[in-house]
Amino acid sequence: MNGLKDNQTSQHPNIVDHEQHQPMTIVLVPIKHASERLPGKNFRMVAGKPLYMWILETLIGIKTIDRIIIDTDSPIILDAAKNGEGIFGREPHRLRALFRPQRLNALNDVAGHRTSMNTLIKRILCDLTPEELENIGLTQNQIDEAFFIQTHTTNPCLKVKTLEEALTRFRANTTSDPSQYSLLSVTSHQSRFYMKSESGNKMEMVPINHDPSSLVRTQELNPIYEDNSCFYIFHKVGFMPTGNRVATHPEFFEIEDIRESIDIDYEIDLQMAELCLEARKKLANNELRRTVLITGAVGGLGTAMVRNFNKNGWKVYETDLKDCEPYNCDLSRTEEIQSLVKTLSTNLSPESLDAVVLGAAYQQCYSLYSTPKEIWDHTLSVNLSANYLLIQALLKAGLLGSGSRITIIGSVHSVCTSPGIAAYSVSKAALTNLTRCMALELGPEGIAVNCLHPGAILTPMLKAGLQRKGDDLPKALERMEKSHPLGKIAMPEDISKAVYFLSTEEGIAFNGSNLIADGGVHARLASE
């Protein structure tokens, strides 16, 4: 075990003496030498490394973590820590091994396998001897005040970014009442769940989160959250009242990419993790990673598109008026378009974009009599001219090439429209022919261009528009749903999937196409 004294930790240039400043961030990682369901799993080779190494390397990549304590009975880990071998030699100040006592030793007997994680946590919070505290380089006062993260070696696909975001949220929200607050990682499921229930001599299937007589779409079901065991963040004062790492009023931190929350219990889990990690290594070496530029990335549809591309492993360059540093851009200003392309060129070089999604839009509702000229000009500038000028600039910069795919977000208003929205409708209608012209000119260069024309999408912008008209929102949405032959307004996720399809090789047959995605609204005769 490490022999560094606590008063030596501040000698390291990357370590801050938090006892005098702010609470430390301490990670607890249990590593058993033996395993019941998958023998020796912590030391199995996964994508070129022992399983336990993946989570440790993720943790040392987070600079705000002050100490990583490995609670272990494994002679392999204890010897490596004592001799400063491997990862212990690289991080002697932050990475410490804590010997698990015989009464909790998984090598002792089968009962050791059933030791509760809460029991191990309580021991570290309250029952360490002065010698044990010295070996892990902490004082009891630091433990009493620290933030704790507890994670597992069996979550090798966890990313640094995910843990950093979770820590940031915990620090921001724990100040209100740390005695009741904790944060845990979850996976959201929107599926139809049942539970078995005995009724007399019969076994019944009882629906949990849905009514079988009313089959609503699964994406509209209330989600059920699974504690995916990836991590728990808590404070000692939140743990002690119940002796549980999940406090009385926990917050859920949803991990959206299900691959990241793989938890290894069985051989099939190990195989899935290996596939995920091997793919990630190739992405890191730019062997697989594809790139996409999305304009209008902060809006309701834009956020869904960004999430979908991220989930599929793309490098996403987001741009909008704000919240997209360093790619903030007012697309109505030619000089800002040029600046955006210059920044992209610097960061992408020598690569080109695999896809561009032109989703930025501006909409104001005025009658023909009352539309101000500046509103007319600005609407056409953002919705039409900006798309043309951005693609032109990307082509001149060499950021589009053979295999690149451009998807323009139009609107059903390009083919059928409503009173009081002339500027928006005209700008979107013009995109249909811009799509055709681009497809004809760029097709010979191997660049495909398509336009997707959504109808109503259930976004904050739609709701705000209905409220601006003075409509009662629930009634207006109900009325709008009834106008759709399918009886449903599209969700942002629905449209983002169509955009993703057009942006990949799956949409290879489409070029110069104007595709309407309005749930069938435009198919209805207005005179009906």
Image (cartoon, rainbow, N blue to C red):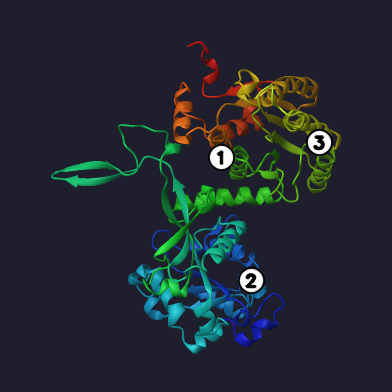
Left-right relation of 69 to 368: left
The answer to whether residue 498 is left or right of residue 399 is left
- The numbered dot on residue 460 is 1
Relative side of 387 to 151, left or right: right
Label 1 or label 2, whichever comes before in sequence order: 2
Q: Disc 2 or disc 3, which is closer to the eye? A: 3
Residue in the foreground of this view, choosing between 166 and 181: 181
Label 2 Cα crowd, 10 Å radius (few <14 / some 14-19 / many 20+): few
Q: Does residue 100 show up?
A: no
Q: Can residue 152 be spotted in the picture? A: yes
**Which one is in front in this view, the residue at disc 1 or the one at disc 2?**
1
Quadrant containing the N terminus is bottom right
* Residue 37 against residue 417 in the figure, above or below: below
Q: How far apart in space, not on screen, are marks 3 and 1 (Cα)? A: 31 Å
The residue that label 2 is drawn on is 86
- Residue ID for mark 3: 394
- Write down the quadrant of residue 37 in the picture: bottom left
Instruction: Identify which residue is drawn at 55% across, 86% down.
Output: 134
N-terminal-most mark, 2 or 3: 2
Label 3 crowd (10 A; few <14 / some 14-19 / many >=20):
many
The amino acid type, in three-letter code, at marker 1 is: Pro
C-alpha span from label 1 to label 2: 51 Å
Nearer to us of marks 3 and 1 is 1
